[in-house]
Amino acid sequence: MAFIDYYKILGISKSAKEGDIKKAYRKLARKYHPDLNPNDKLAEQKFKEINEANEVLSNLENRKKYDEYGEHWQHAEEYEKAKQQKQYQRSTQGPQGSYSEEDFSDFFGDMFGGKASGNSGRQVKFRGQDFNAQLQLELKDVYTTQKRTLAVNNKNIRITIPAGVENGQVIKIKGHGGKGVNGGPNGDLYIEFSVVNNSLFRRDGNNLYVSVDLDLYKALLGGEIMVNTFDGKVKLTVKPETQNGTKIKLKGKGFPKYKKEGQFGDLYVTYNIKTPVNLSEKEKELFTELSKLR
């Protein structure tokens, strides 16, 4: 696996603080975001590298491993365990069994692609690197289950996106990460969903919320109105003397529940009563009469 200098990718030094990493990432992510660079393969690759660098350096534990082991940082724990085992074996052999830095270097090479050392006659297998990707969708796109093809590391992957996926949710595609070392298993692919809501509705989990304008006369006298839901219109009966801000619940008219076929949240409709404007003289007279009755 070729060495990738994450510090260089983000344009920061190794002594950069957490805030510096976040600031550099946001600046570069905006610059190379696919939405701002359509059909630009170079920008797309750069965006992936920026996200990968941020994933590692923004995590204190991962950053520490990366600083010490470079491109092999994901295998730091395995190396330390094996190193300690070697040290123990050498210590039981007495003073003549000391373990040199050269030995450590050789062993490190064995772990990541070199020939097996000593009399073991075998190579140690290690799991491949995990990949991270982000997929941006509209809210309407995740109202129903659908299939998408993603290009990851020059390979097309067909995935099924269950209805009800939430913004920021991450799913794992097993075995579609980096190739394993020395015949080890492949890493996994983690996909983060960025769900953009350009609809009339506000989403909170499986529930949807919407405000509906209601004219004064309908609020006072009652009647019927047509209200938008996410998959069409429904007819509602407005009770007489409905107050401004009244909220009603339409059961099962919300968003689909993730991986629960046929189950939906609720839709909450809030009435926003509109006061009439540009009244005619006759209307003003009638409202005056009404005010006297009250």
Image (spheres, rainbow, N blue to C red):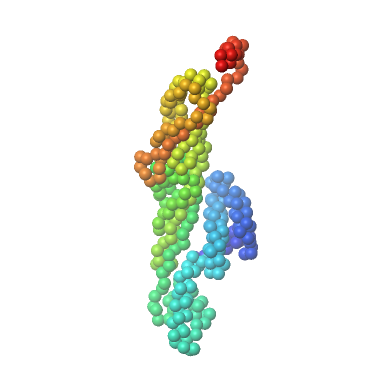
Count how many numbered circles sit on residues in the image.
Answer: 0
Q: Position of residue 170 (x, y in %)?
A: 46, 51
Quarter of the image where the C terminus is located: top right
Q: Is residue 214 above or below residue 201?
A: above
Residue 205 appears in the picture as rendered: yes
Residue at the left extreme of this rendering: 261
Q: Residue at x 58, y 12 (%)?
A: 289
Q: Residue at x 45, y 39 (%)?
A: 207
Q: Residue at x 53, y 64 (%)?
A: 61
Pick the front one: 285 or 15: 285
46 lies left or right of 180: right
Can you tell which quarter of the image residue 178 is in? bottom left
Q: Is residue 108 above or below residue 267?
A: below
Q: Position of residue 268 (x, y in %)?
A: 46, 34
Pick the front one: 44 or 86: 86
Q: Is residue 215 above or below residue 159?
A: above
Q: Position of residue 50 (x, y in %)?
A: 56, 55
Pick the front one: 272 or 19: 272
Q: Position of residue 163 (x, y in %)?
A: 41, 43
Can you tell which quarter of the image residue 250 is in? top left
Q: Residue at x 40, y 45 (%)?
A: 258
